[in-house]
Image (cartoon, coloured by chain):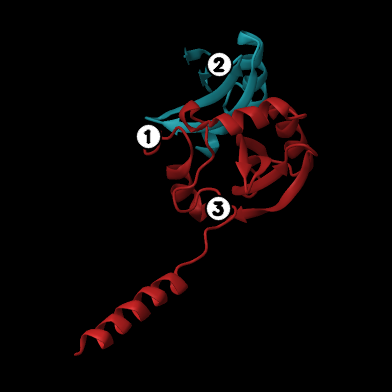
Amino acid sequence: MLARLDDSYLTLAEVVVTAEDRDGGKAMSASLSEAMGELRFRVVVLTGEALKTMVVDAQTGNVVSFT
Amino acid sequence: MSGSRRKAIVALSVMAVFMAAPAPAAQAPLGSGGVTLETSPQHASGARITAFEQATFTLDDIISKVEGTQGGLVIAASFEIVAGKPVYRVRTLQSWNHAVWDGMIDAPASSLEKAGRRRSRSLMPRLKACWPGSTTRT
């Protein structure tokens, strides 16, 4: 995972800012994890009274899901 | 054995169990005993959200501060209520020695509340299993 982390397209801070800008919310938590061989960022954003989770592929920077 | 003696033994046994049980930790360390950084919306209580809305510093502020002062790369950060106090719990990965550093930041003051703990690389597999979002914990 360490080697793959060096290849990551983004940092956690960048993903947090992106998630906040996307929905005008405020990030409550964020993490980087490896699941099924893929490195992904996950950010939980508080928007109004709703909590949304954005998942971003660390290698490509693509948003995998935003629910 | 008489009934009263048996009751006394049972009572003493119960007392011994309670006395031997560890007190609930005010703050459990990250990645141990199933305690992880909480990144799921399901973990957010009303009190936690209310406290978070009042927090002066943002998650981005905290990540920048920790990376600037501790070095390494923040791989997880979460706003939480620990022992009734709002804090940011942060985990960094230090690439130069492959160590994981866990720390806790006082949310209102943005000051380091608890000195971080370093873990050796040999603990990485166990830590990985505790990382939020991993396949073992969702």
Residue B127 location in percent, x, y? 48, 47
Nearer mark to the viewer, of 2 and 3:
3
Please give the label number shown on residue A61: 2
> Residue at label 3?
B28
In the rendered image of this protein, does residue A39 appear above or below residue A66? below
> For numbered disc 2, what is the local secondary structure?
loop
Residue A44 location in percent, x, y? 55, 24
Q: Quadrant of the C terminus of chain B?
A: top left
Marked residue nearer the N-terminal end (3 or 1): 3
Chain letter for the residue marked with disc 3 in the picture: B
Chain that is cyan in the image: A
Label 2 packing within 10 angstroms: few (<14), some (14-19), many (20+):
some
Residue visible at 76% across and 46% down?
B112
Label 3 is placed on what type of residue? Ala
In the rendered image of this protein, does residue B119 appear above or below residue A1? below
**Label 2 to label 3: alpha-carbon separation:** 33 Å
Label 3 packing within 10 angstroms: few (<14), some (14-19), many (20+):
few
Give the colour in which the image draws chain B: red
Q: Is residue B91 visible?
A: no
Nearer mark to the viewer, of 2 and 1:
1
Q: Is residue B138 visible?
A: yes
In the rendered image of this protein, does residue A52 appear above or below residue A39? above
Please give the label number shown on residue B135: 1
Residue A24 location in percent, x, y? 65, 10
Establish whether labels 2 and 3 are both on one chain: no
Residue A46 location in percent, x, y? 60, 20
Label 2 is placed on what type of residue? Gly
Quarter of the image for residue B137 reads top left
**Label 3 to label 1: alpha-carbon separation:** 22 Å
Label 1 is placed on what type of residue? Thr
